[in-house]
Image (cartoon, rainbow, N blue to C red):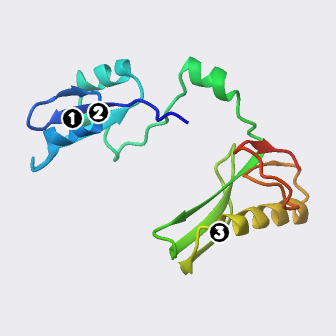
Amino acid sequence: MAKKKKFYVVWKGKHPGIFETWEDCKAQITSYKGAQYKSFSTFNEAKKAFNGNYADYSKSKSKITKLSQEELIKYGTPNYHSISVDAASSGNPGVMEYQGVDTKTKKVLFKQGPFKQGTNNIIFSARTWACLFKRTKKRPHSLYRFTDCDGVGPQKNLQYQT
């Protein structure tokens, strides 16, 4: 899969501007105390941000990213009657945890960990928990994951109805 192009805005750096590569952006912010920069998925977003204020785009402000029309066509409309499952780690092995979230409400349905010496296989535990959650709570949600609850698969990172 091709890497998605990004545009990098530098508000405070050696030479403020909009850059097309991380290497060019990094050259402007390395060793610059208090550098202000952020990446954007389109040039128009980057241009709008550059003409605005860093504070409006910094991590301290929560911003919901919207898909472009091209991305909407490519990915389709999400099924919000679903459980989204994921795992995170700080190494392999390393500290790991996983959780399942109601895709529509963003309510955490279950969370396990952190585990001190987890491996990247922990995502299978997350899927197992999601399947058990669906069955014990009798919730007909779809489940966003790689393989189905019975171990048949793999799927291609797509929603799979169980």
State the residue position of label 2.
21
- Quadrant location of residue 85? bottom right
> 139 or 45: which is nearer to us?
45
Q: Is 128 on the left-hand or right-hand side of 29?
A: right
- SS label for mark 2: loop
Q: Is 111 on the left-hand or right-hand side of 42?
A: right
Q: Earlier in the sequence, mark 1 or mark 3?
A: 1
Could you classify mark 1 by the number of other residues whose Cα lies within 10 Å: few (under 14), some (14-19), or many (20 or more)? Answer: few
Looking at the picture, which amino acid does disc 3 mark?
Answer: Asn
State the residue position of label 3.
121
Q: Find the distance from the CA under tag 2 to the CA under tag 1.
A: 5 Å
The N terminus appears in which quarter of the rendering? top right
Could you classify mark 2 by the number of other residues whose Cα lies within 10 Å: few (under 14), some (14-19), or many (20 or more)? Answer: few
Q: Residue furthest front?
A: 1
Q: Find the distance from the CA under tag 3 to the CA under tag 2.
A: 33 Å
Q: Find the distance from the CA under tag 1 to the CA under tag 3.
A: 36 Å
State the residue position of label 1.
24
The residue depicted at 29 percent of the width and 28 percent of the height is 20
Q: Residue 111, position in %: x, y?
A: 65, 68
> 91 or 66: which is nearer to us?
91
Disc sitting over residue 52 in the figure: none
Determine whether label 3 and label 2 are within 8 Å by CB.
no
Could you classify mark 3 by the number of other residues whose Cα lies within 10 Å: few (under 14), some (14-19), or many (20 or more)? Answer: few
The residue depicted at 47 percent of the width and 35 percent of the height is 3
Looking at the picture, which amino acid does disc 1 mark?
Answer: Asp
- Quadrant location of residue 112? bottom right
Q: Earlier in the sequence, mark 3 or mark 2?
A: 2
- Quadrant location of residue 88? bottom right
Q: Residue 134, position in %: x, y?
A: 85, 59
Q: Residue 80, position in %: x, y?
A: 73, 39
Looking at the picture, which amino acid does disc 2 mark?
Answer: Thr
